[in-house]
Each structure stands twice: as structure tokens, then as C-alpha cells.
Image: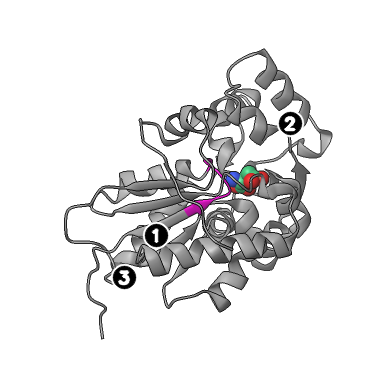
Amino acid sequence: MKKKASSLPIGVFDSGIGGLTVAHAISKLMPNETIIYFGDTAHLPYGDKSPDLIHSFVKNISKFLIRKEKCKSVVIACNTASAISYEFLRDKHVGNVPIFNVIDPIVEAISEDKQITKVGLIATKTTVESRVYQEKLKRRNPDLKIEVLATPLLAPMIEEGFSQDKISNTVIENYLSNPKFKGIDALILGCTHYVLIADEINEFFQGKVQLFDSTDILALKLKDIFENENMLSEKKRQENKFYVSDLTKGFEDSASRFYGQSLKLVLKKLKD
Ligand code: DGL
């Protein structure tokens, strides 16, 4: 039996504001859908936290999104949380709604492109050390060469507003000129923040390396699934909401930059 089309919102969360790049892509592609965003700014960065701690954060957030905000599905718009907690949430989450991660759509897109024989990955330390990208890619294509590099300076640099300047150029060049990336056909931007420096990365590789990030690929995948499952909203969107667990002037200033248009953050502290 087909499910009834639902005008309930889509929950999207990240350790902070980086996931707003994903929320924006979803919102742009599916104009009827209402987004409830949660940025766990009180606990960021997730990229250097232990798996147990990340599990406890994401459990609380999804409880809030599913039980309180009645979301019809939840998108983990964070590579680190997707790498560590996707299976945990999918198998033990608090409601019966589909959970999506940002890693699988990228893995799928790369595996389907037979021109790609060597791929690079830049991401947080936790994402790299989890080996989730490496294992999922190898499972689909055992011949694929994969080179990974933790790039922990990039997320704070982007959050502080450094892009298209001397500092960002130096940091990007320093990381990407690593010899392991010689001859790559594609590079995975394995952190939701990196979308904001995609142009600079593209310039570094002189447009010769295909970049994969978790915005449009994820949004298209979601739309596809929602269409098949009859989950798309047929009604006009309600107002999107953007919650954060800690609200500072800095977050407010950069949130609109990440979302690509001005937005208002609302402070929401979750009980443990
Ligand atoms: N947004 C996170 C990600 O995609 C990076 C920031 C963090 O370490 O919390 O991995």
C-alpha cells in the first residue's frame, strides 16, 4: 500500500552550521518541503569526539526532531556523525522514520562513474579514522584506489570566514599538494563545511579533478526516494526553523553565509 503524501517537516542536523549547506540544497530542490534544522553548536566540533559521545548527542537530537517536531525523516547532514552514528540511529532511533546519511549518496555516485580510478578524500580526523568511506567504496569497487587525508584546519578556518584569501590559499595548497593526491580523478569533500571552499579547491586542481560533496547529490537522492515512497509534501511549505544548542554572534553571522541567504537562528537546549 502506498504511503500518504506528508506535509510533515524534514529534520536536518549537523554538529554546527556546516550542515546548512545540505539544508539549503534540500530546500532549493524541494520547494514544498519544510525543514527543521538543528545545529549542535554547544558540542562542536564532532570531528575530535569519541563515538560514544557522538552517539549520545545524535540520539538526543533525533529524539527532538522526531518526537517534538514530528519530522517525517531525518537527514544526518554531517559526515562525522554519518560515519560514526548512522547505523546506531537507523537501528535504535526513537521513531519509525527513515534516516539518511551524507556518505552513501557520494559513495554511490563515485562507484557508478567508471571513469574514476583514483579518488581522494579530505575530512575530519574522526571521519577518516572511521574508515567508513574507504570500506563502502571498496565494497562497491575493489579496484578503486583511495587516498585519504584528515584536514582538521579547514572547518574552523571556514567557520572563521577565511576563503578566497591568503590564509585559505595557503592552508588548501598545503593539504592538497600532498603527493598522495597526485593523479586523482575525483576528490570527496567529506565535511559539510568544505562546500564553501569548493571553488578554491577547483582552482587548485585547475578544474581537472571532479569534486563530490554532500549537497546536491544528497538532495537528489532524497527527492528520488520521497517520490518513490510517496512522501513528498503536496502542500505549500511552512516556515523553516533553524535551531542551535548554543547561540553566539559568530554563529549568527556565519549561518547566513552557509545557508546562502539570511536566516534567524533560535536557541534550543536539549536535555540529556
Ligand atoms: N560538519 C562536520 C562534518 O561534516 C564537521 C565539523 C565537525 O567536526 O563537527 O564532518
Residue 190 vertical placement versus 164 (above, below): below
Residue ID for mark 1: 222
Residue occupying image coordinates x 22% and y 52%: 237
Residue 186: x and y in percent read: 63, 42
User: Do tag 3 and tag 2 residues touch (Cβ < 8 Å)?
Assistant: no
* Closer-to-camera residue (213/68): 68
Span shown in magenta = 13-18
Sort mark 2 into few (<14), some (14-19) or many (20+) by Cα contacts within 10 Å: some
Some atom of ligand 1 lies within 8 Å of the CB belonging to the residue at label 2: no
**Closest to the observer, 72 or 198:** 72
Mark earlier in primary sequence (3, 2): 2
- Residue at coordinates 32% horizontally, 43% vertically from top-left? 28
Name the amino acid, label 2: Leu
In the picture, residue 174 is in which quadrant? top right
- Kind of residue indicated by mark 3: Asn
Furthest toward the left, the residue is: 235
The alpha-carbon separation of the residues under discs 3 and 2 comes to 39 Å
Residue 140 lies in the magenta stretch: no
Which label sits on residue 188?
none
* Residue 42 at least partly seen: yes
Taking 66 as reference, is 269 above or below it? above
Q: Which mark is residue 176?
A: 2
